[in-house]
Image: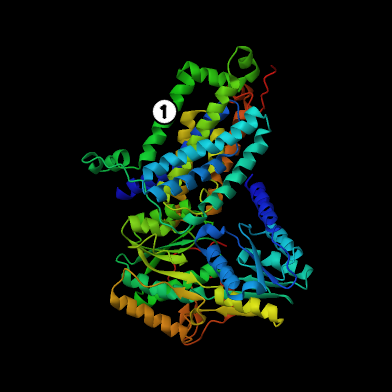
Amino acid sequence: MDITVNILLTIATAATPLLIAAIGELVVERSGVLNLGVEGMMIMGAVGGFGAGYLTGSPWVGLLAAIAMGALFSLLFAVMTLSLATNQVATGLSLTLLGLGLSGMIGTGFVGQPGVRLPNLDIPGLSSIPVVGKLLFGQDPVFYISIVLTAAVMWFLFKTRTGLTLRSIGDSHASAHALGIKVIRYRYLSVIFGGACAGLAGGHLSLVYTPQWVENMTAGRGWIALALVVFASWRPWRVLAGAYIFGAVWIGQLHAQAFGIPVPSQMLSSLPYLATVVVLVLISRNKRLTMMNTPASLGQPFVPDR
Amino acid sequence: MKKLLIALMTTTAALSLAASAEAAEKLKACWVYTGPIGDFGYSYQHDQGRLEVEKALGDKVETAYLENVSEGPDADRAFERLAREGCKLIFGTSFGFMDAEVKVAKKFPKVMFEHATGYKTGDNLGIYNARFYEGRYVLGQIAAKESKSGVAGYIVSFPIPEVVMGINSFMLGAQSINPNFKAKIVWVNSWFDPGKEADAAKALFDQGADIIVQHTDSTAALQVAEERKLHGFGQSSDMIKFAPNAQLTSLTDEWGPYYISRVQAAIDGTWKPDNVWLGIKDGAVKLAPYTNMPDDVKAMAEATEKKIAGGWNPFTGPIAKQDGSAWLKDGEVADDGTLLGMNFYVKGVDDKLPQ
């Protein structure tokens, strides 16, 4: 029993950063902007979070700094693509490259320093209930944030008027603009929200998952988050499911190896991407379904004509 | 996407190099690392060696490096770029650079090349390596003494001879103390991914291992051990700061003295391609201070270290292969060629070697 609980806990830790970063990117893409800089914003969040936590000694300050760092970094992308209408794909890629390099430079002094760790939530009484206690009441705070965030985004996108407006911008920025909606303002806010989420995901890495700073510590998680959004066909609850499936596959693979079941681990490491390709093929088979889910103006620069 | 990214990164890394000023008199020595120098592990230690060269030889030498160079075809470009930029002596520090270095060395016969942990040489290409397996034998003995469950968790990167040799040596050490000792082995297919390494450590601990050994580069696994109040060994650099109560010792690399001697030889014009394999006795493989263990275990570890420094090889027979067939007869010592191409397990390893 204990081992099952431990495995579930490990899966939750592995899935949390993927979920947070992907949920942020989902909102961005729903507004019609494709930001491929998730990896870069995430690593900036990781270094910012570690640095602030290390310098102040407070992991909470670190977490806030991670969010701020991600948001600030995404602002660069927003100015470039929204105000200057640069190519989103190219700008997003350079954001990733810039983030990886810049974070390494900022973090030079942090290498080899033990950081601070965000403590697990521990509600006296509740977290000592066997099995469910640890799972529901004894995890790290970011785990709870990720769940609440997913629910909030789901509600916002599909149950509020502002959410509807945001989605309509993603589907046709020209029509939205004609209706007098402030397309650029919405998109700015979405991109910054996405950046904040990616930063938080990075902060989870350097303050909870592996409390340390090392270059490239995101190790491609930003790309998995991007794949997740497509995998989920832009639906928040599917992002949640996807993040946990990806997490479970990865952790299960490690356990299978330790257990002595021979599995080709290279194959399993590529599963998230493979799954995304399969899902893409499946959803693009059905034209109507594709139209329904994919933000139609995704990735197209928008320049108001007056 | 990732490939493209890596390619872009290699190019940007290469560009950042161009800034270094030219000086006719100085010898330009260059390094190529597979990881970031900020990994606090393998690449970090090589870079510490480079810094020692700068310190020791001062203005007789100029150094440069490329970090984050991916193994495989991209490495060709990195080495060629350095050779064109006037590097006279180039160190490639990762196994996967082997073919790239062989190729580029042929193209630039006047440039001196050195490759770490490989086995191919050339007229202007020498190889060097450290006998990490010597240290791993000591780790095995400590693990067998300190483990209560009799099971160690072993996190490994890729099934190359260097890694297989380490697993074997560790097991021989452990079995010399406890013949029934077991190691659970998990391949993470990466030299460096803190998250994965931490997950692997958790999985191994969950399945009953109580000591963690790693052949990957980050401190993540040790941090998990610290959190769970269990033990483990550091890798490449002393990681005691990350796990003050968990680290038993750390297998560290000291490349400085070797690099200084080679760069000096290049300056003097006496450099020749060589094949050196340095061990505990040369000071290239070091064990960090023994901590968190009783005095008798510490004494045992120190005695073994001394014995190895005195010339004893952990791969001394009788040793059987995993399937039980004989490999080394009583008193027979494995030759370096076999070790450097090692692709089989010794008896008692509980894993199927990925081929």
Residue A37 in picture, x, y percent from top left: 59, 39
Q: Is residue A99 above or below residue A287?
A: below
* Relative horizontal placement of residue A29, taking residue A1 as reference (left or right): right
Q: Is residue A104 above or below residue B106?
A: above
Which quadrant of the structure image shows residue A95?
top right
Quarter occupied by the C terminus of chain B: bottom right
* Relative horizontal placement of residue A9, taking residue B76 as reference (left or right): left
Q: Chain of mark 1?
A: A
User: Can residue B347 be seen by looking at this rendering?
Assistant: no
| Residue at (34, 58) in percent of width and height | B226
Q: Label 1: which residue?
A: A151
User: Can residue A36 be seen by looking at this rendering?
Assistant: yes
Residue B183 in picture, x, y percent from top left: 41, 65
| Residue at (21, 40) in percent of width and height | A125
> How many numbered callouts?
1
* Relative horizontal placement of residue B150, taking residue A202 as reference (left or right): left
- Image color mode: rainbow
Q: Is residue B131 above or below residue B83?
A: below
Residues packed near mark 1 inside 10 Å, few (<14), some (14 to 19) or many (20 plus) = some
Residue B20 in picture, x, y percent from top left: 69, 61
Q: Nearer the viewer, residue A127 or B148?
A: A127
| Residue at (47, 66) in percent of width and height | B237
Which quadrant of the structure image shows residue B291?
bottom left
Furthest toward the left, the residue is: A125
Q: Nearer the viewer, residue A164 or B18?
A: B18
Q: Nearer the viewer, residue B95 or B240?
A: B240
The local secondary structure at tag 1 comes to helix
Quarter occupied by the N terminus of chain B: top right
| Residue at (61, 62) in percent of width and height | B33
Residue A213 in picture, x, y percent from top left: 47, 53
- At label 1, the amino acid type is Ala
